[in-house]
């Protein structure tokens, strides 16, 4: 729906011209053309606001959030594709050790991988704890990293990848599923799955690597088990849970760079920002949006689950344990010029047109500044009833 323009000034001018020409239309009954124009305008405005902050972050080589600071380095590889660069977020090892040890792991990570194309972004964890990559506030940092790189290096948000080694692998096991709607693909190297929500990976390719002799914390056994679980899920959900698992029998924790084959494997994939069948299991770090689903943070609990599918203009709520569930809509997911039908557990609960709404466009641009996740309609399911927001 929303073309990506690297030139912010041009994008803003084009969007404003198109939208202002039809400004007399009702704010809650936009045509598709008007909705697209407003989305273009709002996205350009948000990017223009983000750019000076991103430039200041780059000058300082760090991003701040509340009392946390995330330092980072970047390298750019290859020629920029027409649709924008890829972004490779690479998480170092270490964890609950000394700052000096984690600094050394950060230095190692800077040289560990080289994508054929894209921005190689290596952050230094803001904390020196075992769960440094998946505890609060890493979700907020990931969001800022992506926003900054979109405006600074013309990164395409549909080509963002995350990977990590050792404690960084622990992080990708957790961030991969929890932030699945951010990633084109995920790679885990020599980490521990812990309580990662595997079902959230339905629409994200995930590759995992471990040495067969890497017995600490049973990494070798648990990664192999993870691969078998992915095998089972991909057999159950045909075409989903794309994965590739490598257990190198004779390798210890350090795999001698055998894991570098992950990068071309990942690069073959582009994010599906609007998959037609979504499973969302709420993790211990709570989220209010996942692909085209959402909910208020107030009342959200770990383990709450929703599975919702779209076929044509029919929305099927297959499972939902959320007291309130939002369904965000746009003209890529379905046709907003026609009636939208919602069924809950097989029973029809709603059938009507959903008007394109300026407030939903502005809300969703503000939430993510993500060209592929801008919505113009919104439904709410509460107490078994569906209403238009």
Image: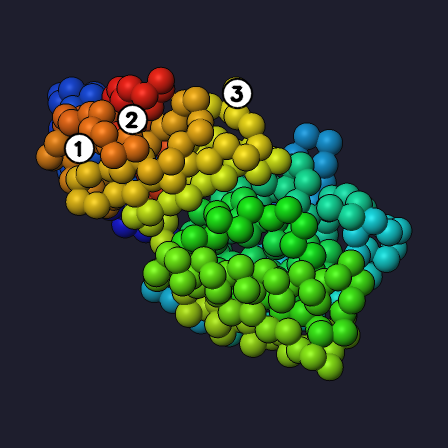
Residue at (50%, 32%) from the top-left corner?
304
Place of residue 187 in the rendered image (x, y in percent of width and height, measured from the top left): 57, 63
Q: Which quarter of the rendering shows the C terminus? A: top left
Residue 247, numbered circle: none
Q: Which of marks 3 and 1 is nearer the N terminus?
A: 3
Place of residue 371 in the rendered image (x, y in percent of width and height, measured from the top left): 35, 45
Q: Which of marks 3 and 2 is nearer the N terminus?
A: 3
Residue at (66%, 78%) from the top-left corner?
248
- Helix, strand or loop at label 2? It is strand
Residue at (59%, 73%) from the top-left corner?
246
Pointer 2 residue: 379
Residue 340, numbered circle: 1
Residue 316 in sight here:
yes
Question: Mark 2 and mark 3 in contact (Cβ < 8 Å)?
Answer: no
- Helix, strand or loop at label 3? It is loop
Place of residue 98 in the rendered image (x, y in percent of width and height, measured from the top left): 88, 51
Residue at (56%, 57%) from the top-left corner?
162
Specify the farthest residue to the left: 338
Pointer 3 residue: 299
In the image, 314 versus 136, the foreground residue is 314
The answer to whether residue 233 is above or below residue 39 is below
In the image, 295 versus 52, the foreground residue is 295
Q: Quadrant of residue 349?
A: top left
Real-space CA distance between mark 3 and mark 1, rounded to the nearest whole angstrom: 28 Å
Q: Is residue 6 left or right of residue 180?
A: left
Q: In which quarter of the image is residue 325?
A: top left
């Amino acid at each position: 729906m929303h073309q990506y323009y690297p030139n912010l000034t041009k994008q803003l001018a084009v969007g404003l011209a198109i939208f202002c020409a039809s400004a007399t239309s009702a704010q809650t009954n936009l045509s598709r053309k008007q909705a697209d124009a407003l989305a273009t305008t709002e996205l350009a405005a948000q990017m223009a606001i983000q750019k000076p902050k991103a430039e200041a972050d780059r000058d300082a080589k760090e991003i701040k959030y509340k009392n946390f600071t995330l330092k980072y380095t970047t390298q750019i590889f290859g020629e920029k594709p027409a649709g924008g660069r890829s972004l490779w977020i690479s998480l170092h090892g270490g964890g609950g050790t000394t700052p000096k040890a984690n600094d050394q792991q950060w230095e190692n990570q800077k040289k560990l991988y080289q994508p054929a194309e894209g921005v190689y972004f290596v952050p230094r964890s803001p904390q020196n704890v075992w769960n440094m990559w998946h505890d609060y506030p890493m979700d907020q940092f990931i969001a800022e990293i992506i926003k900054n790189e979109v405006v600074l290096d013309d990164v395409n948000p549909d080509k963002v990848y995350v990977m990590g080694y050792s404690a960084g692998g622990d992080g990708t096991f957790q961030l991969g599923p929890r932030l699945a709607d951010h990633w084109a693909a995920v790679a885990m190297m020599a980490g521990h799955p812990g309580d990662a929500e595997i079902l959230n990976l339905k629409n994200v390719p995930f590759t995992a690597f471990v040495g067969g002799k890497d017995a600490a914390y049973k990494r070798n056994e648990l990664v192999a088990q993870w691969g078998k679980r992915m095998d089972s899920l991909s057999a159950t959900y045909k075409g989903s849970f794309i994965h590739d698992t490598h257990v190198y029998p004779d390798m210890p924790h350090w795999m001698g760079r055998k894991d570098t084959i992950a990068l071309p494997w990942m690069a073959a994939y582009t994010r599906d920002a609007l998959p037609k069948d979504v499973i969302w299991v709420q993790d211990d770090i709570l989220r209010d949006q996942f692909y085209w689903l959402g909910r208020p943070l107030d009342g959200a609990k770990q383990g709450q689950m929703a599975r919702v599918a779209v076929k044509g203009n029919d929305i099927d709520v297959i499972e939902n344990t959320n007291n309130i569930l939002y369904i965000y809509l746009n003209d890529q997911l379905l046709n907003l010029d026609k009636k939208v039908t919602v069924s809950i557990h097989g029973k029809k609960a709603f059938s009507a047109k959903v008007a394109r709404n300026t407030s939903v466009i502005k809300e969703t641009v503000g939430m993510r500044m993500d060209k592929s996740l801008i919505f113009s309609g919104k439904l709410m399911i509460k107490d078994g009833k569906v209403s238009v927001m």
